[in-house]
Amino acid sequence: MPEIKLPAIETEIRVAKEMTAGNKIIYTVIKVSILKDEEGYIMGSWITPLAMLIIEPGRQYALSITGEKMPLEMILELAPSLKSVVDKARGIHKIKVT
Amino acid sequence: MLAWVEVSSIILTTLSALAALFFVLLIIFLIIPFHFDLEFKKQGPMLRGRYEVSWLGFTLKKDAIESSPSEDAITSILRETQGEAKREQSDEYGRKDEFPAKTAQDAAEPENAEPEKIIEKMDGQKKEDAGQKTKDAQEDDAGDKTGKKTAPALPFNPRTLLDAFPAMVRVCKDLLKSLNFQRLSCRLCFGLDDPVDTAVMSGYLWAIVSALGLFRANIFISPSFAGMMLEGDFVADVRARMLWAMVALINALREKEIRTLLREVVRS
């Protein structure tokens, strides 16, 4: 009897392209789930929003998708690449020393 | 007098014979299918392909397409130059406003190249460590990100297109009747600069595949959420009977909405 294998699910966190609303820039952190068969072909995929980083002039904060406030550190932990966005918003300029 | 009658009857006979011959040829042209053999492959910057059109066993057109590496190098240099110019512009803009606006290109660079995190990789019910990146993410190059594009002006009224849409679907269905896929294989791996857009586009593509009734064919569509990319191969062996294509075109021209749309396109 052939062995029946269940499909594999790969999940990763990504940041969607920023949206601008007035003077706010919103970065959405999303969870991408990919369903693959045993040969590695993608059978389906779905995305789930998790949290948002909101950049306003002089203020940066994060919200979970349920609308609750979440610490900035938590969203940076989810998506480390947003650190550069926050740094830029805070006016921190990095100088490379070689 | 008799001679004129004879001459005119000969001319008439010749003309009718020519007309009959023309009709026979037309019927042969419409009934005997054309044979299209297509093969395209895109891997990285290289695009290779070939096509062949034959009819009644004779090759009418045959050609091979290959994008030269020099062309690709020029394209990539141009893209990089444009990207740098855009970045400089955005930096200047940011300095002027003293507001840390981040362009789409800047935003795309760090986020999309590699996933922030791979949470889990489940093989059935058995969870495995999530230490590895996906294959797509590894293969991807995040260098060629493009910024926002302005939508080009349409040569027709969108309302007219919407009105003509049901008629266009009917025409497409009729046109598809004229095609007989002997062999069809398509493997497409694509990614846009936004993972959300990639997911939406993937949904559209699967919907199109399903609507065309090609779901049984060897079609694989793999979205890559790691950034802009387009890779894959396409092989098709199609037989097209012109009779149904002609019927579809005539039916299309009988539709008022399509005539209006065509008129608008021609006027613009």
Image (cartoon, grey):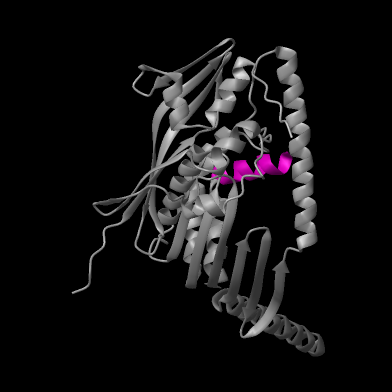
In the picture provided, is B240 more to the left or to the right than A66? right
**Residue sitting at 57 percent across and 14 percent down?**
A22
Q: Is any part of residue B175 visible from this angle?
A: no
Q: Position of residue B226 (x, y in %)?
A: 53, 45
Q: Position of residue B56 (x, y in %)?
A: 61, 84
Q: Quadrant of residue B106?
A: top right
Closer-to-camera residue (B189/A33) = A33
Q: Residue furthest top?
A: A58
Which secondary structure is most common in the magenta stretch? helix
**Residue sitting at 80 percent across and 52 percent down?**
B74
Q: Residue furthest left?
A: A1
Closer-to-camera residue (B212/B194) = B194
Q: Is residue B97 above or below residue B122?
A: above
In the picture provided, is A12 more to the left or to the right than A81? left
The C terminus of chain B - image quarter: top right
Q: Is residue B157 magenta?
A: no
Closer-to-camera residue (B11/A75) = A75
Q: Is residue A34 above or below residue A62?
A: below
Q: Is residue B257 magenta?
A: yes
Q: Position of residue A50 (x, y in %)?
A: 39, 29
Q: Which residues are magenta?
A: B256-268
